[in-house]
Image (cartoon, rainbow, N blue to C red):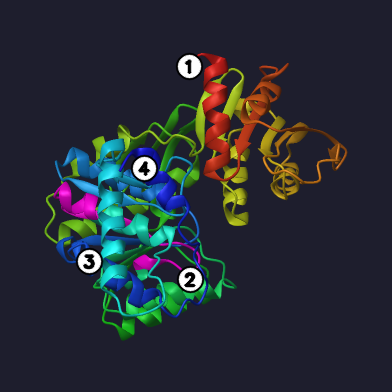
Amino acid sequence: MTYHNAIKYIKNAPNVTPDDSLAKERITKLCEAIGNPQKKIKYVRLAGNNGKSVCACMITSILNKAGICSGALTMPLLSEIRENVRINGEPISIEETAKFTEQVSKAVLSINSSSKDTAIFAPTAHEIILCIALLAFVAHDCKLALIESEHNSGDPSRFLPIPISAIICGTIPSDDQEEISKIYSYIQRGVNEAISIPQDHKAFKIIETACHKANCRLTISVPKKAIVTSLTLGGSHFTYKNAEYSLRVCGRFQVTNAILAIESCEMLVRNGYKIERSHIKSGLLSLSLPSKFEIVSISPTIIIDSTYAPIAIETVSDSMSELKHLTGTKGRLCLPFNELCEEYTEALTKRGYDIESIVALSLFDGEDISQSEIHSIPLTVCKTPKLAAKKALENLNSDTILLISGKANVSEKIRYEMLGILSF
C-alpha cells in the first residue's frame, strides 16, 4: 500500500456516529485481528476541553530528556494524518503510515472474509487511526503512550484497557455534562491516579466524588502556587515548589499547562518511571509549540494559535491582554470565516484591543461571504490560505499585533503560507 492509498483508505472510512451501539464490538474485533497491541502498552489518558495537545507535547519533551521512548495520539484527524501519531514528538514516517494502514486494511478484509454476518465490517476513520497508533507504539517499544480523548461520544479509545492515570487538561465548564460524565467514567473504571488543574466547584465535586468511590488518588495542580517572575514575548520564567523553570513559549496559560505537566511527571515517578528534576527543567526549556500561542514575529508581532473552543478563545485573549504593555492595543485578526470572527472581536475588544481589520478564510463552496464587516470592522474574505496570509500581512504596521487562529487544519495552512512569505 502506498502512502497516498493509505490516506485515501482512512479518509474514505465511515465517520464517527454518536451513540454507536456496535462501537465497542467493532474496535475489540479489529484489535484482536491485528494482535491486540493495546495489551502491550502502558498509557496515560489526556482528557478535558483544552490544552491536551500542549500537555502531551510538554510531557513528551520531558520524557525525551529522561531517555524514555513515548508515543502520542491526538484526535480529531489533522490535515496531515500521519501527524496524529507521534513517536518521541515526531510524526510517524510516510512508510510507517502506509505499512500500519495496510496491516489494518488486511485485518478488515480478513474479518469480512471469515464472517458469516451479511453486514460489512467497516471501522471508522478514528478506529483505524487508533489501531495505527497502537501498532506504532508497539513497533517502537514505547514505554508510555499519551492518548488524547476525543470530544464526541464516538471516541474508540474509551474502550482501551485501564490507563495509568487520567490527566484533566483545561477548565471544564460546569454545564458540559458530556465531558464531565466522560471523565467520571474514566475514573470509575479503576484509574489509580487523576491529575487536574483547578475546576469550578460543581465539576470539582463530581471529579472528587468519582475519585473517592474508586479509591483513586486526586492531585490538583495549583497555578496560584507558581510565582511567575517573567512573562515576555520570548518566553516565561516561573518558580513552582521551590524550583525554577523556564519556557520558550509565552502566555500565562502555558505556565498553567507546564505545572500540570510537572505534576504528571511526579505521578509517573510514583509509577516507576525514572524522571529527575533536571529532565523536567530541560524538557520544558527545549519545548517548541508550533501554532500554540506561537510568536512567529516580534516586529510586527504575529501570534498563531490553533484555537476554536469558546473557553480557549478567552484564554488566548487573556494572554494577549497580559502582553499589551509590550505589543500595544491595535490588532488585526486572521480567522476562518465563521462565528470565531465575532467571538474573538468581542473577547479582545472587551480587553481593550482596537481591532482594525479582519481577514477571513472561506474554504467551503456555497458559504455566504457577502458580509463586508463585523461590528463595523472591515472584513476581507479569502478563498485560499495563501491569499489569506498575504492579505493579513499587507500593510501590517509594527505597532499592530496580528493574531491567526482557528482549528489546526486551517491555522496551520495559513502558518505555512505566512512563513513562506516571511522567508522563515
Task: List the residue tagged with mark 2.
Answer: 153
- Residue 371: where, in percent of width, then height? 85, 41
Task: List the residue tagged with mark 1.
Answer: 424
- Residue 261: where, in percent of width, then height? 32, 51
Tell me if mark 3 has few (under 14), some (14-19) or many (20+) residues whose alpha carbon lies within 10 angstroms of its own: some
Q: Is residue 144 above or below residue 415?
A: below
Relative depth, front residue between 148 and 383 = 383
Quick one: label 2 or label 3, which is nearer the N terminus?
3
Between label 4 and label 3, give the one nearer the viewer.
3
Residues in magenta, as a range: 135-157
CB under 8 Å between discs 4 and 1: no
As for residue 153 lying within the magenta part, the answer is yes
**What secondary structure is marked by label 4?**
helix
Between label 2 and label 4, give the one nearer the viewer.
4
Q: Is residue 21 above or below residue 13?
A: below
- Residue 54: where, in percent of width, then height? 41, 46
* Residue type, label 1: Phe
Q: What is the residue that sits farthest to the top in this orientation?
A: 423
Task: List the residue tagged with mark 4.
Answer: 82
* Residue type, label 3: Ala
**Image mark for residue 33:** 3
Q: How far apart, in angstroms, are the residues tagged by discs 4 and 1? A: 24 Å
Quick one: label 4 or label 1, which is nearer the N terminus?
4
Residue at 38%, 47% (x, y): give it: 84
Between label 3 and label 1, give the one nearer the viewer.
3
Residue at 27%, 57% (x, y): give it: 106
Between label 2 and label 3, give the one nearer the viewer.
3
In which quadrant of the rendered view does residue 329 lie?
top right
Relative depth, front residue between 18 and 32 = 32
Q: How far apart, in angstroms, are the residues tagged by discs 4 and 3? A: 22 Å
